[in-house]
Amino acid sequence: MEYTKIEGKSIGYYGVILLFGILIAVGLFEFVKGMSIGQEDYGTSNIVPWGLPITAVVFFIGASAGALMLSSLTYVFGKEEYKPVSRISIYVAILLIIGALSTIEGELGRPERFINLMVFGATNLTSMFAVNAFLYSGYILLSVVYLWTTFREDLIRVTKILGASAAALAIFVHAGTGAIFGFIVAKELWFSPLLPVLFIIAALTSGVGLLILILTVTFRFTGHKMDEKLVVGLGKYLTAFLLIQLFFVFIENMVRTYGGLGGGEMTKFLFSGPYSFVFWVIQILFGTLVPIGILFARKTVLTVQIASLLAVIGVFAERFSLVIPGQSVPPVQVAGRAAMGFYGEPAIYSISGAEVAIILGVIGALGILYLVGLKVIKLLPSR
């Protein structure tokens, strides 16, 4: 199959570049402000130190892993019908993992301290943070080499080996991210042996859903024809991943309800507390059940796009429902619960404009890198 670049000379192309540039400026403003006067504009606190940016980090990592695993359909399993979108899948995966690490940098407030994880983490591999630092670095390097080999017809066997290795590493990368939360015994909503597995399934859901949106929009506005069968085929994978994800969410919450450390109190907090709207309405209803219903009813390019958008929003809500409520209640202690907030009441987190700006800045940077990549790298199939 022949691939091509886009010309990138139209008014629309530069208009989108300008839009992404504005997002970068907004993000940089809040980043510099945070470095100079601190993060007092953030909605976080000493009780809930991880806010919306960390939710975005987990989402980006998962979507990256899902996108990379999708590329293995062609280069590992030989499904040639997905070859037109395989290069873009790898490229998007690389951008998303870079976006995740960039969001961490923007959220830290003291980005120079990020290097401490690499310097001191090498001697503390009992820390999942340290382990994941090496996983992320190896993941980026392997993905770049994997993408490069797809341009070499004489390296088909190497591409297959690297594709299988990259897909396996993607599984470990997001399972490792899930382990950051799942191995914390003191947090009832986080502590779960099922969480790494749920992270992998959610990664596939968000990766496929996001790719469907990116690919259909890209093909539409670059004048390339996208086979409807390809989109419908991806929609079938999305349906399966949504069903599996729903099953694991159900099982995980049943385990917490009947066998949790706190007697199911955390599950009750999630189901009926201040964040229950995010869980029931955004994650379960509109982010899972509605797209499943749409995909079962009829699969066309439009319906798959709508279902993909809802599924992506649903996975982001799932990440939010894990990260934020999990910090908001007193941790489990040997002798009961420690007092947090006023009189031990759960802390309430409010999303701030500064945190949204940081995420928008990263999205703007990824958008520009994606558009530049389309212009300088042969990622799209020839018309």
Image: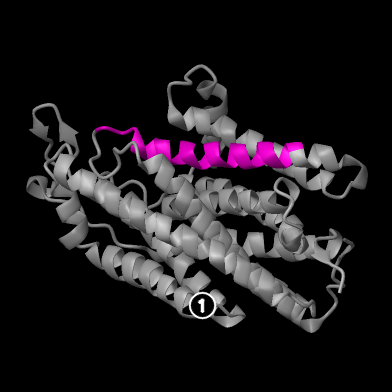
Q: Residue 211 at x, y = what percent?
A: 62, 63
State left or right for residue 347 relative to residue 21.
left
Q: Amino acid at mark 1?
A: Ile
Relative to 223, residue 244 above or below: above
Determine the image quadrant of residue 364: bottom right
**Secondary structure type for disc 1:** helix
Q: Residue 16 at x, y = what percent?
A: 69, 75
The quadrant in which the C terminus is found is bottom right
Is residue 310 shown to the viewer in this render? yes
Q: Residue 164 at x, y = what percent?
A: 68, 39
Relative to 293, residue 137 above or below: above
Relative to 33, residue 294 above or below: below
State left or right for residue 248 relative to residue 260.
right
Verify whether residue 168 appears in magenta: yes
State left or right for residue 15 relative to residue 171.
right
**Which residue is under mark 1?**
306
Residues 4 and 204: in front is 204
Magenta stretch bounds: 161-185
Majority SS type along the magenta span: helix
Residue positioned 35% across, 63% down in the render: 351
Residue positioned 16% across, 51% down in the render: 346
Q: Residue 225 at x, y = what percent?
A: 77, 78
